[in-house]
Image: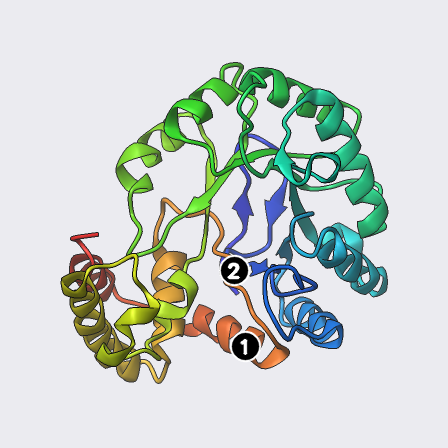
């Protein structure tokens, strides 16, 4: 596994830079045909394989993902697990985003019960709401940090301006946002600020909903309508080049893409998801793909237009 990572200005350390995104663990409201037993098995596989950071959220199955993880971790050393969860969707308001101090404090207490633990390593405000001052929301989390209920404060899906507002008192430790080789806006809009303010960064959708696994060809462009036909052709051509690099390492395209993130100094932890234990095993194998600097630069260049 890769080297230890410190989360922002907190005392949270992650034993390696590969974590697990768990929206397919109990996320019955997000994905069809999910089986809880697969969720249990893949979380166990992750922990048995040396992954320590588990990234979940209330929104994944309206708490079901947290419940499954809470069950699994009872058989492991809690001190070696980094639990990250998120909340903003208010069930009493049809899932409307809520960042008020009262809601966030209740969300943390509820998550602690579902996860069967007495502290969270990282708690994110999952989405910004329309009205709550962001520094006020983060201030409430700071109170929970002082109380020992959370150890690091995070924000997710915040615009650059909202991030700066949230961090007005220098209290934000980590930011999570949609970022991948084909969705790189944060590189210009967020990374300089994050680095300057010692805020860690975690990308979600690092494999771009499967697009960057290399399993889709030119005929599948209609599945990714957010890209123009020309953009999609650029992506598939780039992935053909990545496949050549992957072959040189005896790896898959997905493993090579994950290895690229692991080598990127702007990324603290990468959290690819998985539907079953075999996919977890495949993701874990990415840590053994040691890209040279020239290979890293080549992949960077292949996707430079995004």
Q: Residues within 10 Å of mark 2 (few under 14, many from 20)?
A: many
* Above or below: residue 252 compared with residue 94: below
Mark number for residue 209?
A: none
Place of residue 155 in the rendered image (x, y in percent of width and height, measured from the top left): 54, 34
- Left or right, 239 with respect to 54, comes to left
Place of residue 242 in the rendered image (x, y in percent of width and height, measured from the top left): 24, 73
For the question of whether residue 197 can be seen, the reply is yes
Q: Residue at x 46, y 68 (%)?
A: 287
91 vs 59, nearest the viewer? 91
Indicate which disc, 2 or 1, sits on the residue closer to the N terminus. 2
Q: Residue at x 36, y 47 (%)?
A: 265
Mark number for residue 18?
A: 2
According to the picture, the residue beneath numbered tag 1 turns out to be: 279
Place of residue 210 in the rendered image (x, y in percent of width and height, measured from the top left): 41, 69
Q: Residues within 10 Å of mark 1 (few under 14, many from 20)?
A: some
- Left or right, 59 with respect to 233, comes to right
265 vs 28, nearest the viewer? 28
């Amino acid at each position: 596994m890769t080297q230890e990572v410190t989360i922002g200005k907190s005392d949270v350390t992650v034993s390696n830079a590969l974590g697990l995104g768990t929206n397919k663990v109990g996320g019955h409201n997000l994905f069809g045909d999910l089986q809880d037993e697969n969720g249990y098995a893949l979380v166990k596989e992750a922990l048995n394989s040396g992954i320590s950071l588990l990234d979940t959220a209330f929104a994944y199955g309206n708490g079901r993902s947290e419940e499954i993880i809470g069950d699994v971790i009872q058989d492991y050393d809690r001190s070696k697990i980094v639990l990250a969860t998120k909340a903003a969707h208010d069930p009493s308001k049809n899932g409307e985003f809520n960042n008020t101090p009262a809601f966030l404090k209740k969300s943390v207490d509820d998550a602690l019960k579902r996860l069967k633990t007495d502290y969270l390593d990282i708690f994110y405000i999952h989405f910004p709401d329309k009205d709550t001052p962001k520094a006020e929301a983060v201030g409430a989390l700071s109170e929970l940090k002082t109380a020992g209920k959370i150890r690091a404060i995070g924000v997710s899906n915040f615009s650059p301006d909202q991030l700066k507002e949230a961090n007005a008192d220098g209290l934000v430790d980590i930011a999570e946002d949609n970022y991948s080789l084909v969705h790189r806006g944060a590189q210009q809009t967020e990374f300089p600020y994050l680095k300057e303010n010692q805020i860690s960064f975690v990308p979600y959708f690092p494999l771009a909903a499967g697009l960057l696994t290399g399993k889709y060809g030119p005929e599948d462009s209609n599945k990714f309508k957010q890209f123009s036909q020309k953009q999609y052709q650029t992506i598939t051509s780039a992935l053909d080049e990545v496949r050549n690099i992957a072959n040189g390492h005896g790896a898959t395209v997905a493993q090579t893409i994950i290895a690229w993130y692991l080598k990127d100094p702007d990324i603290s932890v990468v959290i690819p998801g998985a539907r079953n234990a075999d996919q977890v095993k495949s993701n874990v194998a990415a840590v053994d793909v040691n890209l040279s600097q020239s290979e890293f630069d080549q992949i960077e260049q292949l996707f430079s237009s995004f």
